[in-house]
Amino acid sequence: MMHPITRRGFLAAATAAAATTGLAACNLDRGAPNQGPGQAPGEEAPPPDGTREVAPGVQRKDCLILENPTGRITTPDDFNRWRPGFTGSSTGLQQIALDALWYIDPDAGVNGVWDNACAAEKPIYNDDFTQMTVKLREGLMWSDGVEFTAEDLHYTVDLHMNNDGWSFTGQFRGNVASMEMPDKYTVVFNLKQPNSRFHAYFTVRWAACWMMPKHIFEKESDPLAFKFNPPVSLSAYKLKDFDPNGNWYLWEKREDWQKTSMGLIGEPGPKFAMYTAPGPSDKRVIAQTQHNLDVIHDLAPEGMIKLANESKSSVGWFPSFPWAHPDPTLPMVIYNNEKPGLDRKEVRWALTLAIDIVRVSLASYRGAATLSAIHVPPTGLYPQYYFDPLESWLNEFTIDVGGTPYKPFDADASNRAAEEARKTLGDLVPTDPEQIKTALGRGWWKHDLAAAEQLMQAAGMKKAGDTWALPDGSPFKIALLSAAESNPTMNRAASMVVESWKEFGIDASHDARDNTGDLVGPGDYSAAVGWTIETWGGHPDLFYFLNSWHSRFYVPSGKRAAGSNTMRWKHPDLDRIITEIQSLDFDDPKGIELGQEFIKLAAAEMPVTPMMSYNVFTVCDTTYFTGYPTADNPYTNPVPNWGNTKYMFTQIKPKS
């Protein structure tokens, strides 16, 4: 079974710890205060001086400064990315130092969404998908001058297979029967069973299985404990320095950058890159207005609005409202489909119709949410793969309410969200219907308490006074889990969902905490705001998340769920769809048809209630560098902890 790397583990680590740090990039004296020299918080920035040094020999105009959203790294000298629980991924290590066989861009890509990075071509499968051949690029070099070859790929997989405790130990043991190296640049994987998606382990969507330098790790008696310090890079940058307190990491463009896969796209613009822990949202805003932080990972909506109003050099994904980049991730209300009441689709649908999505949008994103009624995020190329083709179906889609076909879709929901946002943000909010559709979504489900009540009654639910109870009269309570203030948008969304449910008569409460995964994974919950659906964004294949939803991997509540099926949903049609997708070539257009079939099934059953894309307020300062990706030039995702942002380095240029 495939369990791809996702942002879930990363986001669990990126908590309020970051709030204790300041902008280390402003003063690189080790142990010095994390504040810009000579500037008090809130002061107007002096005229930018591109020649001032941010580190010895490193001028500001040559150094791209990016936020590391993990915050301060508690083990700053550890670069062993292949060890589970590693927290230093977003220090620049996975973005501009490590490399993988393939990348799929969540947006349009520089030269299309698929990129052969360390591999010379796409994966080559035999007819029954029991063998995958990898042809590697010739002439790629590690930063210490050793060539990258098949021995590195073979070693990476072999080490994981034959030793416990590595990030891909289970995946490779479960799939690989044997490996062959017919020549210096070829590896053949013989698989234990057909798997047309085996290459996904090596394909970056945020991260993947990164290539390991055999000539470094094979010398270590305990490679799992090895800190890989200093790291030998395979991409276009190498480590120059880092803060022993874990607040910043400084990377330098390799002199031989042409001998990397990044160099095949183009020369990286910045000579240096620094990933820093700038602190909470308000400090990030100050840092960027003072031109000390080029790329902000994310902000509270209020911080984004402040930058939009006060910083002429700051640009978001959209030129105006809603600014944020919509990640290929789908925040939702996750129901434990095994809990009494929630095991009925009528109840799950009633809870959906009880949600006032416009109020949720305003509470979470100040109206800047990109809504999605269907079970894929409305991002990347998915509008053309799924949203446009299913628009007419969605408008005619019906569920049974009181014995009558009922159309639950509200095509006007996004327009109403825009109208409400316009009351406080004025002309910043678009009025053009097509712009609203792109930025705020294509509608959502109706807010219809009368229909919701009929659905509850159809499931046998009873009213005990003003509060809904289970068919046997026992209490029906929902404690809705969500992240705490470490993730303010999801926290606020959950709070408004609870408020909507209470108005409908649900005995609901909001349980905000930073360890929701500890409860959701083993099924110790009723409902949660989070996500179980993450997609490639640039590629229509849905097997990326659907693989673990097959009933053969089902794990009941009380034990940790396999993969992302934390809602414990089982359905024979779901199994059939997943099996058929797995039997297809990755690029077979029939995969899109099956994906659309999944969406229709999920809408009918509503195992989770989709809400919106995960919009990230990534903001870029154009004082020293230009050419950042935007909605008008969507060549990659600008969110700086994604591995795919290596492509941004090939397109941005120093302004001077």
Image (cartoon, rainbow, N blue to C red):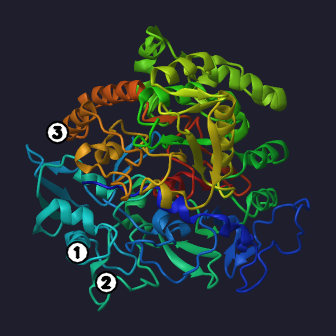
Query: Disc 2 designates what residue?
Result: 217
Q: From the viewer's perspective, is 94 left or right of 173? A: right
Residue 459 falls in image quadrant: top left
Q: From the viewer's perspective, is 149 left or right of 269? A: left
For the point 32% across and 68% down, the residue is 211
Mark 2 surroundings: few (<14), some (14-19) or many (≥20) residues within 10 A: some
Residue 607 falls in image quadrant: top left
The mark that comes first in sequence, 2 or 3, is 2
The answer to whether residue 138 is visible is: no
Number of the front mark, 3 or 1:
3
For the point 54% across and 46% down, the residue is 528
**Residues at badges 2 and 1 in contact (C-beta under 8 Å)?**
yes
The answer to whether residue 491 is visible is: yes
Q: From the viewer's perspective, is 505 left or right of 267? A: right
Q: Amino acid at mark 1?
A: Tyr
The mark that comes first in sequence, 3 or 1, is 1
Marking on residue 155: 1
